[in-house]
Image: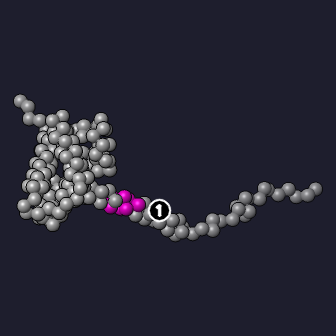
């Protein structure tokens, strides 16, 4: 009768792992490095977005620069710049899409400047309407004795005043109410 042998151990037929441990360590470190780079890129992008938002100081600086350059500019160019400065500020502070709309689209949109009180909303909307009329008026050079010279300086002052009112309204909203 033939000899009966015990079952052979399976270890002899299964090869050992051919990937060394250090390869797995490199894969883990590479994954961590990739995640760290993705996080840093995300943080850098979000930081840039928050830093690009113009503040009231930026708007005032733009208005001052416009005031200095106004004597060399046509009234419709000044009105266009005033409108851009105002709309940029509104877009940055209120997340309003006024920067990307025509005056007609802006005035017909029911939720335009909804965060502002009604009287301030009406003032800003009316001011942008006045600028719209000036923007599309026939172009003529502005001089020292031009009747438009005085109205342009009034519009620049009015822009500064309106932006200050919007800013003060926004800072009042963010302050905690002091109630007794």
The quarter of the displayed image where residue 76 is located: bottom left
Residue drawn where x is 88% and y is 58% of the image: 3
7 horizontally vs 79: left or right: right
- Name the residue rendered at 77%, 59% in the picture: 8
Q: Residue furthest right?
A: 1
Question: Which span is picked out in magenta?
Answer: 38-44
Q: Is residue 149 magenta?
A: no
Residue in the foreground of this view, choosing between 113 and 50 = 113
Packing grade of label 1 (10 A; few <14, some 14-19, many >=20) is few
Residue 81, percent across and down?
Answer: 21, 57
Residue 72 % position (x, y): 15, 66
Above or below: residue 165 compared with residue 1: above
Q: Main secondary structure of the magenta part?
A: helix
Q: Which residue is mark 1?
A: 31
For residue 114, say whether it is visible.
Answer: yes
Above/below status of 134 relative to 143:
above
Q: Residue at x 13, y 38 (%)?
A: 176
**Residue 39 shown in magenta:** yes
| Colouring of the image | one colour
Residue furthest to the top in view is 180
- Above or below, 180 relative to 70: above
Give x and y (percent) for residue 130. Answer: 19, 46
Residue at horizontal 47%, vertical 62%? 31
């Amino acid at each position: 009768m033939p000899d009966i042998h015990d079952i052979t151990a399976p270890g002899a037929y299964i090869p050992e792992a051919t990937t060394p441990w250090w390869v797995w360590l490199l894969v883990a470190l590479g994954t961590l490095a990739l995640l760290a780079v993705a996080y840093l890129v995300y943080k850098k992008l979000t930081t840039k977005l928050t830093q690009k938002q113009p503040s009231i100081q930026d708007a005032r600086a733009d208005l001052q620069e416009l005031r200095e350059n106004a004597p060399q500019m046509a009234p419709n160019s000044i009105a266009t710049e005033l409108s851009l400065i105002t709309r940029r500020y509104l877009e940055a502070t209120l997340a309003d899409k006024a920067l990307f709309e025509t005056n007609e689209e802006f005035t017909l949109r029911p939720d335009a400047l909804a965060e502002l009180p009604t009287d301030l909303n009406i003032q800003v909307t009316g001011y942008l309407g006045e600028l719209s009329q000036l923007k599309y008026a026939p172009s003529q050079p502005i001089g020292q004795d031009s009747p438009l010279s005085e109205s342009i300086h009034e519009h620049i002052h009015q822009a500064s005043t309106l932006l200050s009112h919007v800013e003060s309204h926004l800072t009042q909203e963010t302050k905690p109410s002091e109630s007794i």
